[in-house]
């Protein structure tokens, strides 16, 4: 219900709204004045109505009923003989000015309503949808704001020796993307390739050749500085490990890697616990990142001067996303498991002990022992279940420390990135952890490092830190929902919270499709997320990154649909997404009879011209 009010009613409800917030917003929309203490009266009246007159309430026991209000004066006023404001059940939020005042008949103990609203005038849900989407064409985004679209390049274009594998194949793909009016490309610069063999020995030759080809096509580039490994989740991408010298250090000191409660090490990226520990051949983690960024900036100074590099995405965790690697498939995790906390390496444990001692509770210097395992569900654990330990004094302390570790890492790395890249746009990739969002604890978000249960806003502190560096929030848009997974998932609710929290702080928001977001329904959802038609402030994405699928067969299908997708992102008139897909790939996407009908139509049109 709250999501419906926000999306279709344009009500500025807070992220954690309750029924009082909803009723206050409805009353203000109807022209009433709502005081801070909840007192409500018509704006035309000089002062509040008498205390015997209650807040507006529905005439039938519904979720928005008098019993759900916290103001104790409401219930008592329902029993009095004073006029009561009644709202017809079929009224929409936009028609609240049609309310009437009903008076109680003292003889029959019923309300008289001389001016009842005709039920035929009520606004139905489908009418609301038509108001939001004029014309009823969900595929038409013509006239909407222009959103630049970037496309990723395949992972294996540069090999482990930093050599460009197939220059002609790169040219062919750029030629195809250029024909689709894609604005630019995203290039992943892998730490494991550039500094792969010896520390502080950077090899950029393959990337130099790649950028020279991109320059030929006069396309913009966004660069991802990837401080994580690739291919760990079995995605089909070319495997790229962390630098060999880092792995050698890890053999002697495994605590440089994130560690779960069972002591298993995750080598997708190095632990944030070593950000300020000189354990990487005499350098701290922050210094290693800084040296890599400075080498890139020096090597490609000419590209920055020409304006060919439009943004730098700084990898801040596993998969390049700002998160703890709490749901790693190599550890056995499978959707929709809650994941596990990744704070059991020596250095993060030292940080936890310092934090507990600072709070005066040294015995809190431990991770929760009842948080389940990677594939547990919230109700199966004592920590994440309803009224579980996550909301105890210890639970709130631990989760705050865990989330603050994530924020501190982002703040430290971005501070140095801002020094290196100066006026260049900095981009931070935020994951969409949408499963178990409809539970009280939001368990999957908690293990990923976002302290976002139902009674806590876990994204605002992070975005406050990103705002200091004017960073762009690149949100990984969820694909089409998985039906019947039993995960209490709410991708739309999470998206709404994250995007609005960022927009409310004046941050630029961008988007990227998820690894499984290549079907037609996912593309439509991403368009609606990028350009919310019902947003009264007309906010939209600053740009969008289209992540191509890994396999060749899927790539052909996706690029044909990309034509329609790009046109809609650009605000141009585009054919129906289904029709565009059918014409572009008839043999693989369309039914045979449709394909033959199209061929016959083309022949009928062209035959007279030929004669």
Image (tube, grey):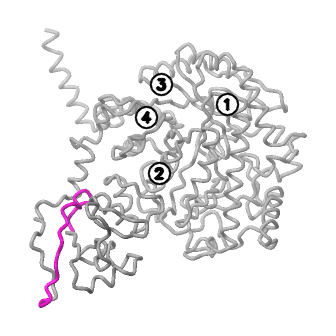
Q: Contact, CB < 8 Å: mark 1 with mark 3?
A: no
- 19 shown above or below 305: below
Q: Is mark 2 on a helix, strand or loop?
A: helix
Q: In which quarter of the image is residue 605?
A: top left
x and y, in percent, of residue 580 in the image: 31, 32
Q: Mark 1 points at which residue?
A: 189
Q: Distance between the residues labelled 4 and 1?
A: 24 Å
Mark 4 packing: few (<14 Cα in 10 Å), some, or many (20+)? many
Q: What stretch is highlighted in magenta?
A: 89-108
Judged left or right of residue 128, residue 429 is: right
Q: Distance between the residues labelled 2 and 3?
A: 25 Å
Mark 2 packing: few (<14 Cα in 10 Å), some, or many (20+)? some
Q: How far apart are marks 1 and 3 (CA)?
A: 20 Å
Q: How far apart are marks 2 and 4 (CA)?
A: 23 Å
x and y, in percent, of residue 380 in the image: 58, 74
Mark 3 packing: few (<14 Cα in 10 Å), some, or many (20+)? many
Q: Which mark is residue 183?
A: 3
Q: Mark 2 points at which residue?
A: 495
Label 4 or label 1, whichever lies nearer to me, is 1
Q: What element carries label 4?
A: helix
Mark 1 packing: few (<14 Cα in 10 Å), some, or many (20+)? some
Judged left or right of residue 536, residue 341 is: right
Q: What element carries label 3?
A: loop
Of all residues, the one furthest to the front in this rendering is 46
Quick one: 373 or 532, which is closer to the camera?
Answer: 532
Q: Name the residue under label 4.
A: 558
């Amino acid at each position: 219900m709250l999501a419906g009010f926000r999306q279709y009613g344009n009500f500025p409800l807070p992220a954690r709204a309750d029924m009082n917030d909803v009723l206050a917003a409805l009353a203000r929309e109807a022209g009433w004045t709502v005081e801070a203490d909840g007192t409500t009266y018509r704006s035309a009246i000089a002062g509040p109505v008498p205390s015997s007159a209650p807040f507006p309430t529905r005439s039938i026991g519904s979720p928005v009923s008098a019993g759900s209000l916290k103001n104790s004066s409401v219930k008592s006023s329902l029993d009095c003989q004073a006029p009561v404001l009644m709202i017809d059940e079929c009224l929409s939020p936009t028609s609240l000015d049609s309310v009437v005042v009903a008076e109680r008949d003292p003889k029959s103990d019923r309300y008289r309503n001389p001016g009842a609203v005709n039920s035929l005038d009520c606004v139905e849900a489908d009418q609301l949808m038509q108001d939001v989407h004029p014309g009823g064409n969900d595929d038409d985004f013509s006239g909407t704001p222009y959103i630049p679209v970037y496309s990723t390049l395949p992972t294996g274009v540069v090999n482990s020796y930093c050599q460009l594998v197939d220059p002609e194949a790169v040219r062919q793909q750029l030629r195809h993307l250029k024909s689709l009016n894609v604005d630019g490309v995203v290039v992943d610069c892998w730490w494991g390739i550039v500094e792969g063999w010896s520390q502080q020995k950077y090899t950029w030759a393959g990337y130099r050749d790649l950028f020279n080809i991109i320059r030929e096509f006069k396309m913009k580039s966004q660069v991802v500085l990837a401080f994580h490994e690739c291919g760990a989740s079995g995605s089909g991408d070319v495997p790229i490990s962390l630098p060999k010298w880092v792995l050698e250090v890890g053999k002697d000191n495994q605590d440089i890697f994130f560690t779960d409660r069972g002591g298993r090490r995750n080598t997708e990226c190095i632990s944030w616990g070593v950000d300020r520990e000189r354990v990487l051949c005499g350098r701290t983690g922050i210094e290693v990142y800084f040296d890599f960024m400075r080498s890139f900036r020096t090597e490609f100074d000419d590209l920055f001067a020409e304006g060919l590099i439009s943004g730098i995405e700084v990898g801040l965790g596993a998969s390049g996303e700002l998160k703890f690697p709490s749901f790693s498939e190599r550890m056995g995790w499978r959707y929709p498991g809650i994941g596990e906390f990744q704070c059991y390496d020596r250095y993060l444990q030292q940080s936890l002990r310092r934090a507990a001692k600072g709070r005066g509770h040294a015995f809190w210097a431990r991770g929760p022992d009842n948080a389940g395992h990677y594939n547990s569900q919230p109700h199966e654990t004592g920590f994440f279940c309803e009224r579980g330990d996550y909301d105890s004094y210890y639970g709130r302390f631990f989760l705050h420390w865990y989330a603050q570790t994530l924020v501190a890492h982002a703040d430290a790395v971005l501070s140095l990135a801002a020094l290196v890249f100066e006026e260049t746009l900095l981009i931070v990739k935020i994951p969409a952890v949408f499963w178990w969002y409809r539970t009280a604890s939001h368990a999957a978000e908690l293990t990923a490092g976002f302290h976002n249960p139902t009674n806590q806003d876990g994204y605002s502190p992070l975005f406050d830190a990103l705002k200091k560096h004017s960073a762009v929030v690149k949100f990984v848009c969820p694909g089409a929902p998985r039906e019947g997974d039993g995960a209490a998932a709410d991708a739309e609710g999470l998206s709404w919270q994250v995007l609005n929290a960022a927009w409310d702080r004046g941050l630029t928001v961008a988007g990227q499709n998820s690894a499984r977001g290549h079907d037609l329904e996912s593309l439509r959802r991403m368009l609606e997320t990028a350009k919310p038609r019902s947003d009264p402030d007309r906010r939209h994405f600053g740009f969008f990154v289209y992540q191509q699928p890994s396999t060749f067969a899927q790539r052909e299908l996706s690029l044909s649909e990309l034509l329609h997708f790009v046109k809609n992102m650009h605000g141009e008139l585009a054919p129906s997404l289904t029709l565009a897909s059918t014409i572009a790939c008839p043999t693989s996407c369309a039914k045979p009879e449709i394909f033959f009908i199209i061929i016959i139509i083309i022949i009928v049109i062209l035959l007279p011209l030929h004669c």
